Image: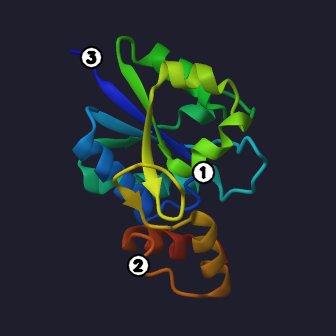
Amino acid sequence: MPDTIALFGGSFNPPHLAHQMACLAVLETEKVDRILMVPTWKHAFGKELAPYEDRVEMCRIAAALFGGLVEVSTIESELGDGESRTYHTLRALAAREPGASFRLLVGADVLADKASWHRWDDVVAMAPLIVVGREGVAGDQAFQLPAISSTEVRARLARGDSVDPLVPRSVLDYIAGRGLYR
């Protein structure tokens, strides 16, 4: 029987506990065989990001506790120098994973921005949505992720403030070791 793969894309700049919680919620409540975390190669809206290799490694660290059910894909870096577009990523993944079906894991906050996505209707047709609620975002999802954002984590780190318990300890160790977000 072919796999059902949930695609979980994002800048993961850095990955935090809400990202891990989203993975856990989906693995425990949805009919998916695995989750692919796909760090953005180049942000489609021009946001400045930590180096790609660091974000990939932080995702690997964050995914490790799932024992292989959450994998990290570098497919977006393999697609070229252009900005990341979920439509192109899904097409490439479908070519690599013939017979697999895809779902797109998003936070409820993404729904307000769907008009800015490249070929949104095609994306949703290729990978029906799994929407996880976010605290402070209107929606009818039973499960709500806490209001943790990478933006706030970066701001706290830049000020020298604590980010406990927003980021996994292993990811924080990596951030400190690499001197990221200062």
Left or right for 154, reference 145: right
**Quarter of the image with the C terminus in it:** bottom right
**Nearest the eye: 144 or 22:** 144
Three-letter amino acid code at the position of disc 1: Ser
**Nearest the eye: 148 or 156:** 148
Is residue 92 visible in the rendered image? The answer is no
Q: Residue at x 40, y 59 (%)?
A: 144
Q: Residue at x 47, y 37 (%)?
A: 73
Q: Residue at x 31, y 54 (%)?
A: 64
> How far, Cα to Cα, is label 2 from label 1?
20 Å
Q: Residue 145: percent from the left, percent from the top?
A: 41, 60
Q: Residue at x 45, y 26 (%)?
A: 128
Q: Which residue is mark 2?
A: 165
**Quarter of the image with the N terminus in it:** top left
Q: State which quadrant residue 160 falls in.
A: bottom right
Q: Which residue is mark 3?
A: 2
Q: Residue 100: percent from the left, percent from the top?
A: 35, 18
Which label sits on residue 11?
Answer: 1
Query: Mark 2 Cα within 10 Å, few/some/many (few <14, many 20+)?
Result: few
> How far, Cα to Cα, is label 3 from label 2?
37 Å
Does label 3 or label 2 sit earlier along the sequence? 3
Q: State which quadrant residue 79 falls in.
A: top right
Three-letter amino acid code at the position of disc 3: Pro
Q: Residue 36: percent from the left, percent from the top?
A: 41, 38
Quick one: SS at disc 1?
A: loop
Does label 1 or label 3 sit earlier along the sequence? 3
